[in-house]
Image: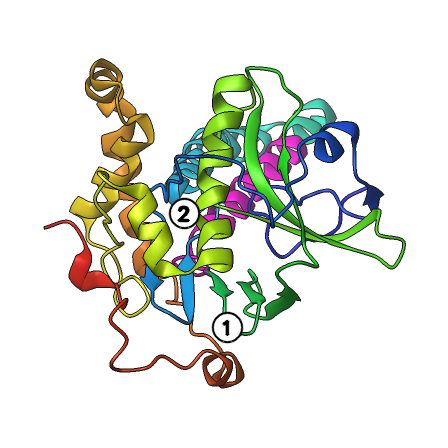
Amino acid sequence: MSTLDPHGMVSAYKVNRPLNHSEKQHRFDVTQPCSQKPHYELSLIKLNSTFVECVDKWYSMRGFVAMGGCVIFSMFGAALIYGATALAQRRPFDFVLAGLLLATMVLVAFALHLLTRDAFTYTHYPIRFNRKNRQVYVFRRDGTVLKAGWTEICWTIYGQGIGANDGYVMGHILGEDKTTIQESFALSKVTTANPYGIQGLKDHFEFFRRYMEDGPEHVLAAIKPVPLIMLPGIYKTRESWAFGWERLTLNLNGLVLFQVLYQVFILPMSLFRWFVMRTSKIPQWPQWVEDECPIDPNDMWIRDERHAAK
């Protein structure tokens, strides 16, 4: 079953259930390397000797849900106005048309629900890995914070191994039986759950595993010759339209032809993404989280928006 999970966007992650076979098969051992090519997937907000902070899985797709909601609202909103006008002119009362209008109202309400799941929320939902106290902090959709031990979280790949299904790295909080999932959140990379995609997810998780186990010096050395490019200060300012368009386009990174062809969808989506970011609040960690994650001002490993792409 699913709950009103505070990490979901359109639908909730399924909780109060046991780990499935695929999750058990792809469960990570945080003490063992899972890849020789760690990759951060343009997901990093801050990095230093105390913690690394990243966005969650919804960030790269922001604007998509709002655009879908607006399209549905426009279609059925127009139908609702037309139908209501026709019903008012009917004599005698048309119960069939009234039933259709009621169904249309439900669809309009669903469209508004989709819009408010993307817009009027938070610009992003950060996840912070503190290697000094071995804790992970997750910013929930409702503004509260989940705190859990790095080694106490069940890290695994979610996906059923079918090419059409999405796969992503999940962090599960398990109950006392160490089997039942109580809460879940996901890292930023989303890909098809086939062998090639699963390897990419291992590369992504390895970045955070290596940071937590070996520190910033080792993980930054491991990603070379890939440069470290940080997100542009989204913890204090809203992203620009240009960066939002670039981030959506990079979802097809390496597929130049598709990046060009899909601009028919990406360009309007970037406008909805801009609207989403302008109507949403920038998340702020509670003071108790900041108190547990002090940064040495002389830390030579500080990386932030000053290391973003220009």
The answer to whether residue 93 is above or below residue 180 is above
In this rendering, does residue 21 appear at all? yes
Q: Residue 234: percent from the left, percent from the top?
A: 29, 61
- Residue 118, image x and y in percent? 46, 49
- Taking depth in this image into account, of 113 and 191 the one nearest to the observer is 191
Q: How is the image coloured?
A: rainbow
Q: Is residue 104 magenta?
A: yes
| Quadrant in the rendering for residue 10 | top right
**SS state under label 1:** loop
Q: How many marks?
A: 2
Circle 2 is placed at which residue position? 59
Q: Quadrant of residue 165?
A: top right
Which residue occupies the foreground of this view, 242 or 221?
221
Q: Residue visible at 70% across and 59% down?
A: 152
> Which mark, residue 23?
none
Name of the residue lying farthest toward the left:
310
Instruction: Give SS at disc 2.
Output: helix
Tell me, yes or no, whether the two marked residues, 2 and 1, touch with CB atoms within 8 Å: no
**Which amino acid type is marked by label 1?**
Lys
**Residue at (42%, 60%) from the top-left corner?**
215
Q: CA distance from mark 2 to mark 1?
A: 27 Å
Q: Is residue 210 magenta?
A: no
The residue where tag 1 is placed is 132
* Depicted 219 relative to depicted 169: above or below: below
Looking at the rendering, the stretch of residues picked out in magenta corresponds to 101-126
Q: Is the stretch drawn in magenta largely helix, strand or loop?
A: helix
Q: Residue at x 50, y 68 (%)?
A: 130
Chain-order first, disc 2 or disc 1: 2
